[in-house]
Amino acid sequence: MLKGLYDWTMRMAGHRRAMPALFAVSFAESSFFPIPPDVMVVPMVLADRTKAFWIAFVCTAGSVLGALAGYAIGALLFDTVGRPLVEFYGYGAAFEDFTGRYNEWGAWIVAGAALTPFPYKVITIASGVAGLDLWVFVISSILARGLRFFLEAVLLWRFGPPIRDFIEGNLKLVTTAFFCLLIGGFVAIKYLV
């Protein structure tokens, strides 16, 4: 079953609509969707290594624009729904303390989440809730997401065939590791945020 899904993904990576789909997944992942765009980046680069840097650019652009949507979700919905609830339950002062600390370390928090398997959408929404400076948020997002996707593209471009051979030879292991990292990110949210 995994081999069939992998083969299908590789075929779709070469499809004429693969790039718009990558942009859409990257956008959605930064604001509400649970699956990271890496699941598309890897097969797309492996299918056509000459497009590696364009793929990284499209993924970065979609991700940063999606991050802005996540920021807007946090900023706009918090004022109308979240703040009255926080104040009703008596957590207004605690929330002010949280936003102060978040804004102090915000650039590093955004960059850390953008580079790791930690669900980035949580940080984009939290940044909007905390009112993190928009320019700090955007610059951190561009730099960190760009670093992540371009580094991935460079490695796949440079070492493509051996990486493809490794993935195809160890598909169950690679899939298990991917899902462990994804689930680990959600567990980290529960205990760290």
Image: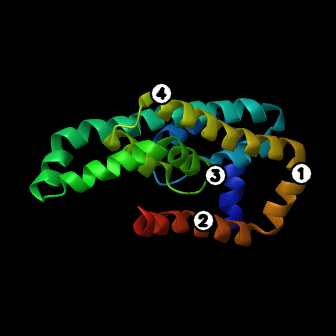
**Is residue 1 among the parts visible in the rendering?**
no
Give the structural element (helix, strand or loop) at label 1: helix
Q: Residue 159, position in %: x, y? A: 88, 49
Q: CA distance from mark 4 to mark 2?
A: 30 Å
User: What residue would you read off at disc 2?
Assistant: 181
User: What residue would you read off at disc 1?
Assistant: 161
User: What residue would you read off at disc 4?
Assistant: 135
Q: Residue 177, position in %: x, y? A: 67, 69
Q: CA distance from mark 3 to mark 4?
A: 29 Å
**First along the sequence among labels 4 and 1:** 4
Q: Nearer the viewer, mark 3 or mark 2?
A: 2
Report the front residue among 8 and 20.
Answer: 20
At a point 33% along the width and 52% down the height, the residue shown is 98
Please name the amino acid that badge 1 sits on. Answer: Pro
At a point 72% along the width and 72% down the height, the residue shown is 173
Q: CA distance from mark 3 to mark 2?
A: 13 Å
- Circles 1 and 3: CB distance less than 8 Å? no
Q: Nearer the viewer, mark 4 or mark 1?
A: 4
Q: CA distance from mark 1 to mark 2?
A: 24 Å
Q: Residue furthest left?
A: 88
User: What residue would you read off at disc 3?
Assistant: 39
Report the front residue among 101 and 144.
Answer: 101
- Circles 1 and 2: CB distance less than 8 Å? no
Count the labels in the image: 4
Give the structural element (helix, strand or loop) at label 4: helix
At a point 34% along the width and 37% down the height, the residue shown is 131
Q: Nearer the viewer, mark 1 or mark 2?
A: 2
**First along the sequence among labels 3 and 2:** 3
Placement of the N terminus among the 4 image quadrants = bottom right
